[in-house]
Image (spheres, rainbow, N blue to C red):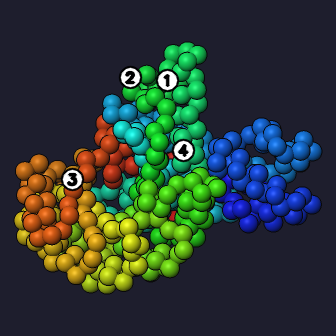
Amino acid sequence: MELLGKSREELKAYCAGLGEPTYRADQIYHWLYAEREFSVERWSNLPTELREKLVREAVVTLPSVRQRYVSTDGSVRYLFGLAAQEEKLLKKPAAVEAVFMPSEGRQTICISTQAGCAVDCQFCLTAQLGLIRNLTAGEMVAQVLMPLKEMEERQSMAPHGPVGERPASEGGPYNSEKLPDGLAARTNVVLMGQGEPLLNFENVMAALRILLDAEGVGLSPKHVTLSTSGIVPGIERLGKEEVRPKLAISLNASCDEQRDTLMPINKKYSLKILMEACRNYPLRNWEHLTFEYVMLGGVNDAAEDARRVVRLLGPLTRVKVNLIPWNPGELPYKESSAETIEEFRMILVEKGVPAFVRYSRGRDVMAACGQLALKEVQGPPLTVLG
């Protein structure tokens, strides 16, 4: 029985099957998600007999940390190795990447929802992998819990020895000049790593219910964002969920012809269909719908593109646009100039569309938006599904 990723209800059913009272499930749930304690032997308020039974009959499977890469801005890119899933014909474990980004007063963790991606956005390195497999709820929750636990342990070590010492990896050692001291008060989580979250809907929602549960990981819906390329049925389905994160739409183009080329998913869900889904999306009273727009020099960054974006978003209420300078990679695009980005932003703002420039973190360790592509995995290529 895999415990990580299980809901309180699933744990209660499991405990009942063991002949244990259901409140034991609440204790297990608390240890896993609130305490971030993954060693059953340390669950001190469980009877010794139950702990011994869990050691024999249950597991808490964490991804392995294959590599850590520490950016000069303090961001940490993790390469997580995942357990093999023989039933899906994988002959070797898959791997994904996540990024921990410390800032003043907060930290943000960008997690992956699939190993690889099938959506094939032309400016994203992950698209080159294809879809390897969906992640389980536990594998997604672990990408949040493990960096938080690691930073907590680092903080607790600080008074007793050199801050930040860790074994070196091929990507470079931890060191006290780069890594942050401890955890900030607020944690943000963004589902913007590898994969399309709405194409792994059930597992993503199972993970989010744990992350957003006040008695689980305890994150606020205001601080968790799911980014989609525009999977319209998934957007409609997400809007009906009682517990859900904020929604961001990866737009990246100002017309169908442009978006068909950059994001082939547009051929299935055109801008007209996507904008209709956005108009119908039930925003909460504190919520804005965010549109992400990767700025590609000479491709989608002209003044006319900005004016078309204004016309696209005009019928919507409570929107904002994040303009993201493209992060160089092994793809045939170039960055927009700072002047071009500012001109684009001002056109939106002057027409009443709030727009902000979001420079990505961790560019020097390939941790920025669109750069996650498992380039560190050695050996033969991972098996691709579909």
* Relative horizontal placement of residue 156, taking residue 256 as reference (left or right): right
Up the image or down, 347 lies above or below 76; here it is below
How far apart are the alpha carbons under marks 1 and 2?
9 Å
List the residue tagged with mark 2.
177
Quote the CA–CA distance across marks 4 and 1: 20 Å
How many residues crowd mark 4 within 10 Å: few (<14), some (14–19), many (20+)?
Answer: many
Q: Which mark is residue 28?
A: none
Q: Amino acid at mark 2?
A: Glu
Cβ atoms under marks 3 and 1 closer than 8 Å:
no
**Mark closer to the observer (4, 1):** 1
**Does residue 277 sit above or below 34 in this rendering?**
below
Between the C-alphas of marks 4 and 2, the distance is: 24 Å
Q: What residue is drawn where x is 46% and y is 46%?
A: 186
Q: State the separation of the CA atoms marked 3 and 1.
A: 32 Å
Marks 1 & 2, CB-CB < 8 Å contact: no
Q: Secondary structure at mark 3?
A: strand
Q: Secondary structure at mark 2?
A: loop
Whole-percent x, y for residue 307 in the image: 10, 72
Residue 60 in view in this figure: yes
> Residue 67, position in %: x, y?
50, 36
Q: Type of residue at label 1?
A: Gly
255 on left or right of 330: left
Query: Which residue is labeled 3 in the image?
Result: 357
Is residue 81 visible in the rendered image? The answer is no
Residue under the image location 51 percent in, 16 percent down: 162
Which of marks 2 and 4 precedes in the sequence? 4
Q: Residue furthest top?
A: 161
Residue at mark 4 = 80
- Label 4 vs label 3, nearer the camera: 3
Residue 246 in the image: x percent, y percent? Answer: 42, 65
Residue behind mark 1: 164
